Image (tube, helix red, strand yellow):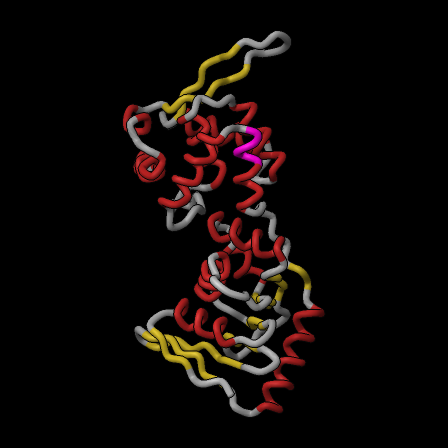
Amino acid sequence: MSENLLERTTADVLRSILDEATGDLVVVDPNGTVIESLVDIAVDYDGDLPALNVLADDRLLKDVMDDFLVAADAADLVDDGGMALRELDGDADNTLLVGEDELYAVVAADEQVAALSADDDEFIADAYETYRGRFDDAERFNLRTPAISRIRTTLDEDIGEAVRADFDGVLESLETARGDGDGLDEVTISLLVAAKNDVLLYDISKWGEDVGIASKATFSRTKTRLEEMGLIDTEKVPIDVGRPRLRLKLGDDSLRDADSGELASVAHRMLN
């Protein structure tokens, strides 16, 4: 029989539940913090991760997945079969984590988070059957962000190891990557690390479109905005046939002097 869990954070509660789970889990009507914490825990989980079948409000999923850092990790989990995301029709009374042998309701109060467990085996079995059925019947959530592992592999192969290393360094320095004033989006990050390494706009935008980050047009518009704001410069590179291509350069000494871990914070200050 499962026991009630009382922890300091949502992440601590969820990690305890995953450690105790004996099979797959249906995660019903989670809030944004639960989804982000599940993704963060699952990508680095040490042990046999139970399959996480997330049944959540589609508007909430879209909002959470607007953060590239969360979405790219979630896409890895989806690709590997560790997580499935589906749209909840209606809602539940609480955030639930339901397995064949366990049922928890996650409740936050003041500075603590609890997972309150059910102790009736028949009720748990009925709840699992109910919510597993709702999950199986639900619409699959369209996660458009490519998996972070694919991004890293193709960036390494198509653009270069140094650019991939700088890309990783920028991501590690960020708490969010939304591009809404709280962080830099994935296109801006890609262009900045490309400029740090003197990469052609054509090459980074083609890579970005091929891997599924954004279209070439989006890369071009973002480049223009960054150039107008002084973050990026370009120089023309002649080619044998057609118009010259543009080589990206960092446009400010503070950016040129920054390492990959500092690049995002310097760029963020300049953009704001």
Main SS of residues in magenta: helix
Q: Position of residue 98 (x, y in %)?
A: 57, 77
Where's residue 46, x and y in %? 47, 62
- Quarter of the image for residue 106 reads bottom left
**Residue at screen point 54% across, 55% down:** 74
The magenta stretch is 154-158
x%, y% of residue 228?
Answer: 40, 25
Instruction: Name the one closer to the observer, 22 or 159.
Output: 22
137 vs 92, left or right, is right
Residue 5 position by quadrant: bottom left
Q: Who is closer to the viewer here, 129 or 158?
A: 158
User: Measured from the top left, where is residue 34 in percent x and y?
Assistant: 46, 66
In the rendered image, the vertical position of residue 52 relative to residue 173, given as above or below: below
Q: Is residue 19 magenta?
A: no
158 relative to 49, above or below: above
Residue at the front extreme, as displayed: 47
Residue at screen point 62% across, 53% down:
79
Q: How many marks?
A: 0
In the picture, the quarter occupied by the C terminus is: top left
Residue 120 falls left or right of residue 229: right
Q: Judge whether residue 105 can be spotted in this image.
A: yes
> Image height check: is 166 above or below 42?
above
Identified at 60% across, 72% down, the residue is 24
Q: Answer yes or no: is residue 217 visible.
A: no
Q: Residue at x 37, y 27 (%)?
A: 231
